[in-house]
Every structure is written in structure tokens, then in C-alpha cells.
Image (cartoon, grey):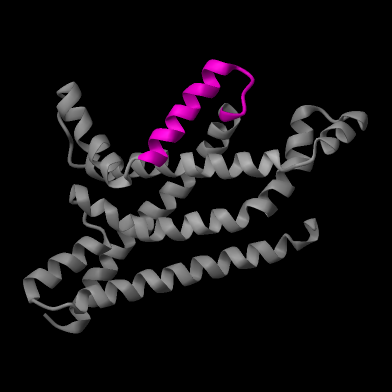
Amino acid sequence: MTFNTMVLLIAQGFMKSFLIFCLTLLGSLPLGLLVAFGRMSAFKPLRWLVKIYISIMRGTPLMLQLMVVFYGPSLLLNMKISTDWRFWAAIVAFVINYAAYFAEIYRAGIESIPAGQYEAASVLGYTKRQTFFRIVLPQVIKRILPPVTNEVITLVKDTSLASVIALTEMFTWAERISVSQGTLMPFVIAAVFYYVFNYIVAFGMERIEKALDYYR
């Protein structure tokens, strides 16, 4: 197998990894905000339920969660698994895992806003909804960008864990080619893809952070 063929096959796997990355962020970022609200809820049963969910997601390996989500319907509910479920099981597992981490980041950001700002907004006639979206949320976004960036960079690398359920993303292709050709070159090529993608993500997040400097 030529070098160019290796690159093309791994690039094909990269597109699947990129799709996992995008769909995970699309699902986990808004879900994480909802989970954060549940975590801060005054309704104790909901708050404790959310705390248990976050504890489980952060306390068990993502690899294990992938396997449970993928095999669970078949082993627990005796459901027939379709060929498409492999991909969607990965998305579900990634989303519920990362939503737990984002929820704690959101919570830390929201709770860091001084209570005086809520009181001032109330005096000015703002509703709770207006206060959150117009005053609190812009400041929260600015404060949580560094830890969110760390999680997003970790997600780029974590997409390789989808290989545990035989999803043919980039790492899976690199592993298959390496075994069949007896060379480490596919892993080197995959490492370059991961590094460049992470560099682009970090650069983009840094630009966003600089654009929000006016919230100092």
C-alpha cells in the first residue's frame, strides 16, 4: 500500500471522527446547560438526580459508557441492533458524557457572577429570563471559555474511543492499515491529523476569547 493510499484512507476515517466531534458538541453544549440548571435547582429530588447522573458520567470511563449504550438495547431489552445504531450509539454516549462535564463548567461560571448583578437587574425592571440572557450569560461565556476549550480539545482525541464498538473512524483505519501492512506509519499520519485538528480548534477558541475581551 502506497503512502498516498494510506493518507486517503485515514482522511476518510477523519471525516467520520469530525462528524462525531461536531454532533457531540451540537448535542452536549445545550444539554450541559440544561443539566447545570437541574444541578442548581431548588427542587431537591431533581438536584440529587442530576448530581447522581454527573457523578456516574464523570466517575466511569467513556469507553465503558460507549459499550453500555451500544450493547445495552440488545442485552437488556432484547432489541435487534441495526447497522446504523453503531454510529448513533457513539453519538449518544459522547453527548451524555460531555454534557456532564460541560454542566459543571456552566455551573461554576454561573455561580461566579456576583449576586449584586441580579439585584441590580431586578431594580432596573429586568425579568429573570432577561437578566440571565442579557447580563449573566455573556459574562459566563467569557469566564468558561478556557475550561470549555480544554474539554473540546479532549473531545478531538476522545473520538478515537469510538473504535471500541468497531466504528470505522480515523483511529480504526490507522490500526487496520498498521496491522495489515506491518508499519507504524498509519499511526504517524493519524497523529498529524489529530494534532492539526486540535491546533485549529485551539486557535479558533483563542480568537473567540479575544473577541470577548470587552467583558473585562
Looking at the picture, tell me which residue is in the foreground, 58 or 166: 58
Residue 211 percent location from the top left of the image: 71, 64
The answer, for residue 172, to whether it is visible in the render is yes
- Residue at the (22%, 30%) spot, across then down: 72
The C terminus, quarter of image: bottom right
In the picture, measured across the screen, residue 200 lies left or right of residue 214, that is left
Q: Which residues are magenta?
A: 39-59
Q: Is residue 5 above or below residue 216?
A: below
The answer to if 11 sits in the magenta stretch is: no
In the picture, measured across the screen, residue 156 lies left or right of residue 9, that is right
Query: What's the magenta bit mostly, secondary-structure-wise?
Result: helix
Quick one: which residue is furthest to the right in this view? Answer: 123
The N terminus, quarter of image: bottom left
Residue 156 percent location from the top left of the image: 40, 60
Residue 112 percent location from the top left of the image: 71, 43
The answer, for residue 79, to whether it is visible in the render is no
In the picture, measured across the screen, residue 126 lies left or right of residue 108, that is right
Count of numbered circles in the view? 0
- Residue at the (33%, 40%) spot, across then down: 60
- Residue at the (57%, 37%) spot, across then down: 33
The answer to if 41 sits in the magenta stretch is: yes
Q: Is residue 19 above or below residue 181?
A: above
In the picture, measured across the screen, residue 126 lies left or right of residue 39, that is right
Residue 73 percent location from the top left of the image: 21, 28
- Residue at the (52%, 44%) spot, across then down: 102
When asked about the image quadrant of residue 47, the answer is: top right
